[in-house]
Image: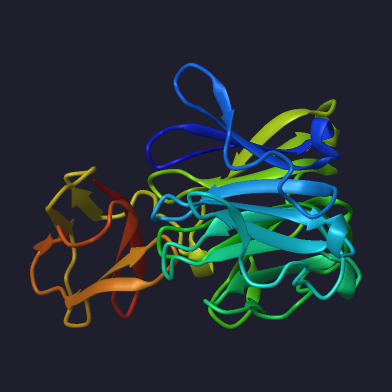
Amino acid sequence: MAFSPAGQPYVVFEDFANFRKATVMKFNGSNWVNVGIAGFSTGVVNYTNLAFSASGQAYVAYSDSGNYNKATVMKFDGSNWVNVGNAGFTAGEADFISLAFSPSDGQPYIAYSDGAYSKKASTMKYNGSSWVYVGSAGFSAGIVYYTSLSFSQSGQANVAFRDGGNADKATVMKFNGSAWNYVGNAGFSDGVAGFTSLTFNTSGQLFVAYEDFANGNKATVMKFDSVFVGINETKGSGLSVYPDPAMDKITIETSEVTNTSQLAILNIDGQQVISCQITGHKTQLDIRNLPNGVYFARLTDEKSVEVKKIIKQ
């Protein structure tokens, strides 16, 4: 299920009334109606997933029995469902497919359990003409289940999954532009994790929901409370940042200033977006051009590093 940019709910499903092929329906305000024809796929579908492009086009991804259970992605062109690239474009069987759009390049991506690579995690994107791997294929430590793909505000791809390489616990990995790295520890859940689902809140913080085998198979939600490369908020320091939340300007106040005091504003991915040298106990910065979200003010000198979290609204 997904909502269109206009706010209409859409669903994609394996349609037993149409030979188990893919059907998409939307709610028009009073009734559920077909989007295009019912049962539009070539054959039986599994692991159906639905997402919308920035322009509002509906896309679906699924494991396509009409193409050896490889992944197929289709989009609705206003009249018909048409293939995005080739049908059955993955090297092998694709299970647990998750479809999402990158805010950076606007292209569709899928994450899945890759039968061509021992059912480890792979991610592919459509480059405008064909589907290509994002980083290495089969990048996880072992077999994966319940892959869930989501993008940070800065456009980094993150994938959550039940990790066969780490006792079937939950793991999240992100693509740094050249390689896939763990977000926090691999296998971070208390026990086996089922049906992992990954998303970011409006402040850019990462959340994972899953069936928690260590707690009676009930639902558990966890959030990632640290920041890229281990930057953590300093407790009880002489650094203060206000107002918080802030809209256009922030004031950084510190009890001690040296000739080497440097200030940096970092986004939640650890990327430096503002930097300057501190020359007084109070420094004002203009942040109106920064996207809304969570940031960190980091003050360094030859003796210490102090960090404070701020929210830009």
Query: Residue 284's quadrant in the figure?
Result: bottom left
Q: Is residue 184 visible?
A: no
Label count reads: 0
Quadrant housing the C terminus: top left
Residue 254 vs residue 8: left or right?
left
- Vertical arrangement, residue 47 with respect to residue 216, above or below: below
The residue sitting at 14% across, 54% down in the picture is 250
- Vertical arrangement, residue 244 with respect to residue 122, above or below: above
Give the percent coordinates (x, y) of residue 275. Answer: 22, 75
The residue sitting at 16% across, 82% down in the picture is 259
Give the percent coordinates (x, y) of residue 186. Answer: 74, 60
Quadrant housing the N terminus: top right
| Nearest to the observer: residue 24 or residue 305 | 24
The residue sitting at 62% across, 40% down in the picture is 222
The residue sitting at 90% across, 64% down in the picture is 68
Query: Residue 299's quadrant in the figure?
Result: bottom left
Give the percent coordinates (x, y) of residue 6. Answer: 37, 37
Q: Is residue 155 visible?
A: yes
| Nearest to the observer: residue 111 or residue 52 | 52
Q: Which residue sits furthest top?
A: 30
Q: How is the image coloured?
A: rainbow
- Vertical arrangement, residue 105 with respect to residue 296, above or below: below
| Nearest to the observer: residue 152 or residue 190 | 152
Give the percent coordinates (x, y) of residue 121. Answer: 77, 66
Residue 184 vs residue 287: left or right?
right
Residue 143 vs residue 100: left or right?
right
